[in-house]
Image (spheres, rainbow, N blue to C red):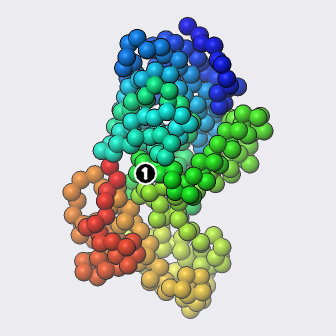
Amino acid sequence: MRTTEARPAPLDRFRLFASTELDEAREIVARTFCDHRLRQVRAGERLDARHNHAPGQLFSLNYIRYGADVEIEPGELGSFYLIQIPISGTATIRNGRTEVLAGPTRASILNPDRHTAMRWHAGCEKILLQVDREALGALVESLSGHRLAGPVRFDPEIDLERPEMAAWIRRVRALVAETDAGRLMPGTRDPFRQLLEEELLGRFLALQPGNARHLVDGVRDRAQPGHVKRALAYIRANLDGPVSLADLAAAAGVSGRTVQLGFQASFGLSPLQVARSERLKQVHFALLSRNDDTPIAELASAWGFSHMGRFSALYRQAFGCLPSETRALH
């Protein structure tokens, strides 16, 4: 059964469906996202479901509401992240071990490799960014110059009271408005749109706590001289083995002394110190990502740190806490 709309919803010109039928809502939402369990909490409550969907290149824009109080359980999303921004009402979101009460001051992001269960309370409406998992991983590698040793994960709770995150949400809403107005057409191979999406996701990566935040926040190497970039790329490609000044000079196509001077001018560090910093970043990524009780010494050793006391001191200097104090993202 189709519903009538009293006021236009966001992305209304890209409507997929509007229905009062639970099974229809579940089936059509699943076509865009993934299979899931959908249950109406109060049988007598009127369902007023709507899904609007505007495809993109790295992510799609969506508007969803159910009207009634519903439970949604997709399990693991698999191929995508889902940033959920409430525009009215509240929802209880569980992703992995973290529970978020989403509302005016809290949004959420679902990690694709964590079990998800949600309750959207009556009156809840959201803007959702469905972000392709492979595209996000490729963007992190492009921005950071690092090959990722595992999936990107985020803290599921997005704090909208942080001014910089509130500003990011306003940019998302502006993108929705531009799409609604027809000034940004969805689904087209538009280089400007791709740059816009990359910039928006890159900013989110730098703002939202997660295991890749330290890899992309404050990235400066794009402004460095060519020989410094080449030497840095060699370091990052060979973090699991010894790197000599001669190796860097050969990779950069300049003398060892020029490499040393270039790194000092660009980073205020020697090549050895930069290589050590890059290895520390990989250990930090591993500690934030780990799912088991892998010993810290084993993770550190895998990235070339054999003296645990020295490693712990360097780690605390870089990240403001001891390795043992780093909380894995679950």
Query: Which residue is at the far top?
Result: 1
Where residue 237 sits in the image (x, y, percent)?
A: 47, 67
Residue 182 shows in this picture: yes
- The image quadrant that residue 227 belongs to is bottom right
On screen, residue 270 above or below 24: below
How many labels were placed on the picture? 1
Residue plotted at (64% across, 27% down) = 9
Number of residues whose C-alpha sits closer than 10 Å to that of mark 1, classed few (under 14), some (14–19) or many (20 or more)? many
Q: Is residue 151 visible?
A: no
Residue at x 41%, y 47% (from the top left corner) = 156
Q: Residue at x 72, y 33 (%)?
A: 180
Q: Amino acid at mark 1?
A: Phe
Residue 275 location, quadrant? bottom left
Q: Is residue 186 above or below residue 133?
A: above
Q: Secondary structure at mark 1?
A: loop
* Vertical position of residue 305 compared to residue 217: above or below: below
Quadrant where the N terminus lies?
A: top right
**Percent x, y for residue 299?**
28, 65
Between 246 and 73, the residue placed more toward the observer is 73
Write the residue at 53% across / 40% down: 85
37 sits to left or right of 18: left
> Where residue 100 sits in the image (x, y, percent)?
39, 43
Can you give x and y, in whole percent of width and height, for residue 10 in the image?
65, 31
* Extreme residue toward the bottom, this view: 257
Position of 210 compared to 223: left or right? left
Left or right of 216? Residue 36 is left
Residue on which the image places disc 1 = 154
